Amino acid sequence: MIKRLLDFLDASPVNFLAVDNIAKILNKAGYREIDPRNPIGKVTEGDKIYVKKNDSSIYAFHIGQERLDNEGFHIICAHCDSPTFRIKPNAEMTCEGGIVKLNTEVYGGPILSTWFDRPLTIAGRVILKGDNAMNPKTRLLHVKRPLMQISNLAIHFNRQVNDGVKISKQKDVLPILGIVNDELERGNMLMDIITKELNVSREEVLDFDLYLADTTPACTFGMHNEFISSGRLDDLSMCYAGLEALLASETTRRTNILAIFDNEETGSQTKQGAGSNFLASMIRRICIAQGGGEEAFCQAVERAFMVSADNAHAWHPNYSEKYDPTNHPMLGGGPVVKFNASQKYASDAVSAAIFSEICREAGVPCQRFVNHSDVAGGSTLGNILTSSIALRGVDMGNAILAMHSCRETGSVADHIYTVKAFTRFYK
């Protein structure tokens, strides 16, 4: 199970590739893709379908024996985006000596210093000319070798670096791509990489959504290999746990849904994010395909339960003062239910009790997380989704260290625990 997770993390450096990999796994498991531009058609017991939005979010449905308005649905939500750097248009900047660096902008809230002095590559999607202007083609790109690096300034020129230095997002974190050794490369280095990797001409390339990614493989470490070290554990580990549980589920009376959103790290307010009405629209259309209508959709929502799966903060042995004194989850201690008095999380006493019982039935320990009252916390997609679909639900996740670092730390045991809990939830 852990080997499958590590392979998925390595193959999914950005949201587009994560969604593509999930779709391929669903296809092998007998799911069929539907085009949201077309009628869904008849939906019957046991049907396995999925739909994508923007190639960066994906929603899978395992249709139950009963209509949604009779039994509701169980849904696990996660997000496939992670903090990184987006390559800007006209990105190449040629400096003295022919050194080329790329102009980038920060996506989300990364720990900037963790991206320095690492071998990096590029990944994302490239838009090519199609049959007409309204229908361009999309190709995914993942250069599987080190291409660039964000190099630190030597300590001899920055004696205060270990005392804490403010990092400029425009100046300090621009990666070095190469040295021009042919005049034809000037201003074309990035385009040369794109065209060679995709085997297309420059004239075919219209635009791109490309991001930086660490090339160091995901791995386990520790005396007993009890820890996971990888980028994007937040939140691809939850995406994959939900996927494994969905694939293990049999057809039940209730419909099971896995919803993988994009853009959680930037607020979710996009057509492919949890703040859009796309998921609600798809559930409504399934209700209609089952012979129901708006009333059926409303009943289905009232009978539903959501697990919003986004990782939590593990207790850090070097910074115990940052954590709530009685609610700080430990690595290896099991899934974490997250609470916030200001309603940044969807959990309440009822939904927490339900999820805790699911964990108990699965033979899995369950922990609690509440922020230290003097330390501001983040939010997640659960409460954003419930603002558009009035779902009962709980916010949870696995405890990890160094959230939003280029490389985060999780627990092998916790991943196994969560897959077990999710599998029980879908039953």
Image (spheres, rainbow, N blue to C red):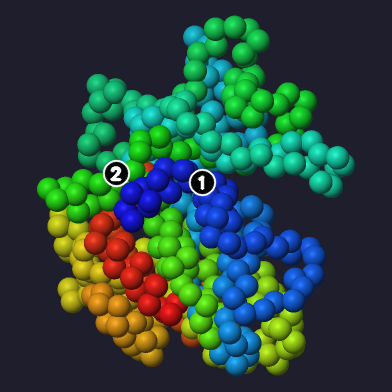
- The mark tally for this picture is 2
Q: Amino acid at mark 2?
A: Cys
The answer to whether residue 152 is above or below residue 375 is above
> Which residue occupies the foreground of this view, 257 or 330?
257
Q: Hey, which residue is sitting farthest left in the picture?
A: 223
Question: Residue at point 66% right, 54% down?
Answer: 54
Circle 1 residue = 14
Q: Name the quadrant of the N terminus.
A: bottom left
**Whether residue 57 is visible:** yes
Disc 1 residue type (three-letter): Val
* Cα separation between marks 2 and 1: 18 Å
Q: Position of residue 267 (x, y in %)?
A: 54, 62
Residue situated in front as seen by the camera: 140 or 40: 40
Locate residue 198: give its quadrant.
Answer: top right
Q: Earlier in the sequence, mark 2 or mark 1?
A: 1
User: Which residue is rendered at x = 60% and y = 20% of the image?
Assistant: 189
- Residue 410's place in the image compared with 87, above or below, is below
Which residue lies under the disc numbered 2? 219
40 versus 71 height, above or below: above
Mark 2: few, some, or many residues within 10 Å (few <14, many ≥20)? some
Question: Which residue is painted at 69% across and 77% down in the image?
Answer: 43
Q: Residue furthest right?
A: 132
